[in-house]
């Protein structure tokens, strides 16, 4: 249990036992609670816009799945995710216009909310980076060099384009490199497909889920971080790699440009073009890959660059001190 001065906690341990219980809390129980507490601001931190009686209501939406269009094979690999995208698409819509403000992490998601739900009051709030672990001394690479992709095996993570690029590059360069994937092959139907399809490729290593300490070592040993994901609200490994000064190969998508921000050790590739990715990886091995400096994209207002700016927008009155229910 947390113990923070000025903060009171009310727990609902049964709320996540099922979606029916979750909906009951969001649309019935919280309304009674709002009348009891009479807060001035109600900030929901997990996507759903509850039915509450309050002066100012705000929701933080961090799940991008409603805006993803799964390919047929992805629906077969992970049918629950396919159904989840449809479910969340309508879940977001429920009571969304009751909010005075919707908070998202990136500009492309703001535009998606405006387009799909007709929401107008949307603020972009970039995650505030914490301390990046010290990297220590650089690892000396004699070969093979390591391309690391740290991600869970979800269909939109697009592992297959990196594996296909590795297949192409192996035919050209042989065992001059390794690709490390943080999955074992037993996690899902999609993971099993990847293991079955690429396990015989000598340069692809399925290293499984890593602890925090193991992940730090993986980052340290990697010569380059590859991030081909087709869907993200942010993409934390990009920020982690950037904080460590690692070179990056990143999918050429709006989320990635916003997450990379100002950085001079990044190259972008078409997330469905394995040959293009293989060319960039080969140029890195040869020492001929020249990154172009990347600038931070301009973010329209309202935009919160830190926690203080975000809380002022949530409250709605600069400098005000109000009671807030999260």
Image (tube, rainbow, N blue to C red):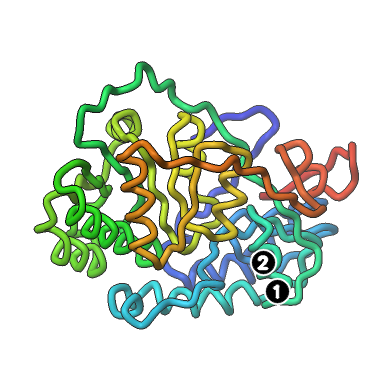
Q: Give the quadrant of residue 197.
A: bottom left
For the residue pair 207 and 66, the one nearer the viewer reads as 207
Which residue shows up at 44% across the image and 74% down it?
A: 84
Instruction: State whether residue 35 appears in this view.
Output: no
Q: Is residue 283 left or right of residue 66?
A: left
- Give the structural element (helix, strand or loop) at label 1: loop
Q: Position of residue 263 (x, y in %)?
A: 58, 37
- Please tell me how many numbered marks the rendered image carries: 2
| Residue 95, disc | 1
Q: Position of residue 9 (x, y in %)?
A: 60, 42
Which residue shows up at 42% across the image and 79% down it?
A: 83
Task: Pick whichever of labels 2 and 1 is earlier in the sequence.
Answer: 2
Which residue shows up at 49% across the image and 28% down it?
A: 132
For the residue pair 251 and 113, the one nearer the viewer reads as 251
Q: Is residue 309 left or right of residue 326?
A: right
Instruction: State whether residue 159 appears in this view.
Output: yes
Q: Position of residue 185 (x, y in %)?
A: 18, 58
For the residue pair 287 and 183, the one nearer the viewer reads as 287
For the residue pair 182 and 161, the one nearer the viewer reads as 161
| Residue 49, disc | 2
Which residue shows up at 68% across the image and 70% down it?
A: 113
| Residue 287, disc | none
Q: For mark 2, does the 10 Å Cα neighbourhood hold few (<14), some (14 to 19), or many (20 or more) residues?
A: many
- Give the structural element (helix, strand or loop) at label 2: loop
Q: Which residue is at the far top?
A: 137
Q: For mark 1, does the 10 Å Cα neighbourhood hold few (<14), some (14 to 19), or many (20 or more) residues?
A: few
Q: Is residue 91 left or right of residue 185?
A: right
Q: Give the quadrant of residue 91.
A: bottom right
Q: Is residue 27 left or right of residue 206?
A: right
* Contact check, label 2 and label 1, Cβ < 8 Å: yes
């Amino acid at each position: 249990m947390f113990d923070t001065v000025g903060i009171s906690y009310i727990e609902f341990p049964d709320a996540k036992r099922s979606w029916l219980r979750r909906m009951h809390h969001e649309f019935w129980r919280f309304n009674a609670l709002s009348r009891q507490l009479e807060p001035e601001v109600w900030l929901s931190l997990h996507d759903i816009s509850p039915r509450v009686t309050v002066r100012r209501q705000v929701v933080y939406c961090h799940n991008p799945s409603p805006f993803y269009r799964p390919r047929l094979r992805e629906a077969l690999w992970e049918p629950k995710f396919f159904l989840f995208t449809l479910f969340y698409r309508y879940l977001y819509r429920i009571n969304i216009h009751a909010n005075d403000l919707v908070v998202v992490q990136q500009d492309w998601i703001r535009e998606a909310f405006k387009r799909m739900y007709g929401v107008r009051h949307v603020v972009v709030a970039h995650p505030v980076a914490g301390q990046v672990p010290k990297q220590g001394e650089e690892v000396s690479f004699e070969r093979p060099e390591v391309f690391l992709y740290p991600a869970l095996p979800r269909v939109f993570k697009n592992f297959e384009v990196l594996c296909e690029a590795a297949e192409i590059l192996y035919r050209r360069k042989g065992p001059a490199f390794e690709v490390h994937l943080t999955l074992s092959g037993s996690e899902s139907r999609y993971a099993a497909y990847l293991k079955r399809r690429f396990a015989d490729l000598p340069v692809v290593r399925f290293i499984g889920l890593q602890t925090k300490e193991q992940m730090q070592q993986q980052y340290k040993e990697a010569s380059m971080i590859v991030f081909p994901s087709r869907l993200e609200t942010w993409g934390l490994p990009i920020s982690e790699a950037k904080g460590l000064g690692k070179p990056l190969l990143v999918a050429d998508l709006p989320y990635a440009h916003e997450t990379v921000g100002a950085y001079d050790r990044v190259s972008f590739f078409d997330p469905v073009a394995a040959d293009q990715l293989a060319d960039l990886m080969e140029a890195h091995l040869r020492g001929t890959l020249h990154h172009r400096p990347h600038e931070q994209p301009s973010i329209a207002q309202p935009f919160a660059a830190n926690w203080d700016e975000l809380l002022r927008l949530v409250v709605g009155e600069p400098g005000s001190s109000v009671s807030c229910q999260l």
